[in-house]
Amino acid sequence: MTTTDNGGPAAGAPHAPLPPADPAFAQPALQPRPAPALSPARTLGILSLIGGIASIVFGQTVLIPVAAIVLGFLARQREPYSRAYANWGIALGIIALFGWVAVLILGALIAVPFAIFHWL
């Protein structure tokens, strides 16, 4: 076998076989990766939150806050991972719904004196 100046084998010279690997340091066989876990369903909770925000932003309606509250309670029962979304949807829906009720009461309080004095 020919050697170079530094004592290693010359280019093109055959290499000595490697010693057998110690089984304690052997790497495990390649395994296929497991499929990524699907995220849990949060549809009802997100719809409740969107309904609550929409009822606050787009004015005082009755249907949207009620839908947000109902969807929020359904989401709390069926989708445990969307509990925060559902709670916010319920809270915003209640705020918007009571805002509507407050507007009706305030309107009645303002209109009643005019109605009473109209008949006098």
Image: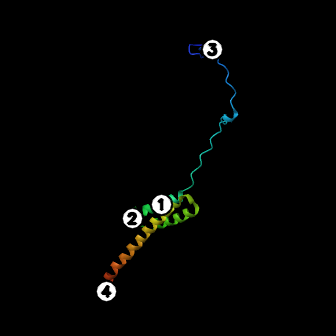
Determine the CA span between mark 3 and mark 4.
Answer: 119 Å
- Secondary element at tag 2: loop
Identify the amino acid type marked 1: Leu
Asked whether, in this view, residue 93 is left or right of residue 5, the answer is left
Q: Nearer the viewer, mark 3 or mark 1?
A: 3
Circle nearer the N terminus (3, 2): 3
Q: Mark 2 — residue? A: 59
Q: Nearer the viewer, mark 1 or mark 2?
A: 1
Q: Nearer the viewer, mark 4 or mark 2?
A: 2
Circle nearer the N terminus (1, 2): 1
Front position in the image: 37 or 107? 37
Q: Mark 1 — residue? A: 49
Determine the CA span between mark 3 and mark 2.
Answer: 85 Å
Q: Mark 3 — residue? A: 13
Identify the amino acid type marked 4: Trp
Image marks 3 and 4: residues in contact by CB distance under 8 Å: no
- What is the quadrant of residue 8 in the picture? top right
Q: Nearer the viewer, mark 3 or mark 4?
A: 3
Circle nearer the N terminus (3, 1): 3
Determine the CA span between mark 4 and mark 2.
Answer: 34 Å
Image marks 1 and 4: residues in contact by CB distance under 8 Å: no
